Amino acid sequence: MDCLFCGIVNGDIPATKRYEDELVIVFDDINPQAPVHQLIIPKQHIATTNDIATEHHALLGHMLQTASVMAKQLEIADDGYRVVTNCNAGAGQTVFHLHMHLLGGRPMHWPPG
C-alpha cells in the first residue's frame, strides 16, 4: 500500500507531530488553510468515510474527542474552530486515509466553499 499517512504512522515519512496515542496521531498540515491547521488521523488505515464500519465507532469518537482536546491546548476552543472530513476527490480528499482537519485561529465563514 502506498499511503502517505500510513508512512507517517510507520515513521517512514516525517511530520510535525503534536499528539500521539495508541489510536491516533495529530500533526501540522503542510498546506495550512488557517493559522491553526492540524490533521487528526487514525493509525489504522481506513480509506474514506465510506469505508467506516461498526467496529470503527469508538475510534471516530476518539478522533472527535482528540479534536476537542487539541483545540483547548492550541487555545482556539473558546473562539471557535472547525472539524472537517472530506470524502473522495469531488469533496477535496487528496489523501485516501481517513482524516479530520482541525482548523481555527481566524473566523470561519459559511458556506465553506
Image: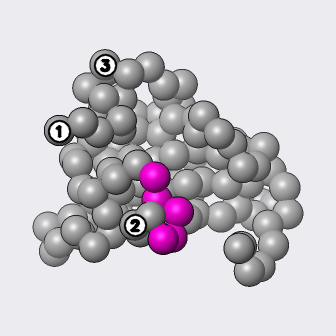
Asked whether 28 falls inside the magenta stretch, the response is no
Q: CA distance from mark 1 to mark 3?
A: 13 Å
Most common secondary structure along the magenta stretch: loop
Q: Earlier in the sequence, mark 2 or mark 1?
A: 1
Check the picture and name the quadrant holding the N terminus.
top left
Query: Is 48 drawn above or below residue 10 in the view shown?
Result: below
Instruction: Read off the residue under disc 3.
Output: 12
Q: Nearer the viewer, residue 92 or 17?
A: 92
Which residue appears farthest toward the front when viewing the image?
90
Dot 3 alpha-carbon crowd within 10 angstroms: few under 14, some 14 to 19, many 20 or more: few
Q: Picture quarter containing residue 62?
A: bottom left
Q: Is residue 6 left or right of residue 104?
A: left
Query: Is 24 drawn above or below residue 18 in the view shown?
Result: below
Instruction: Read off the residue under disc 2.
Output: 88
Q: Is residue 97 left or right of residue 37?
A: left
Residue 85 seen in this snapshot: no
Residue range in magenta is: 90-94
CB atoms at circles 1 and 3 under 8 Å apart?
Answer: no
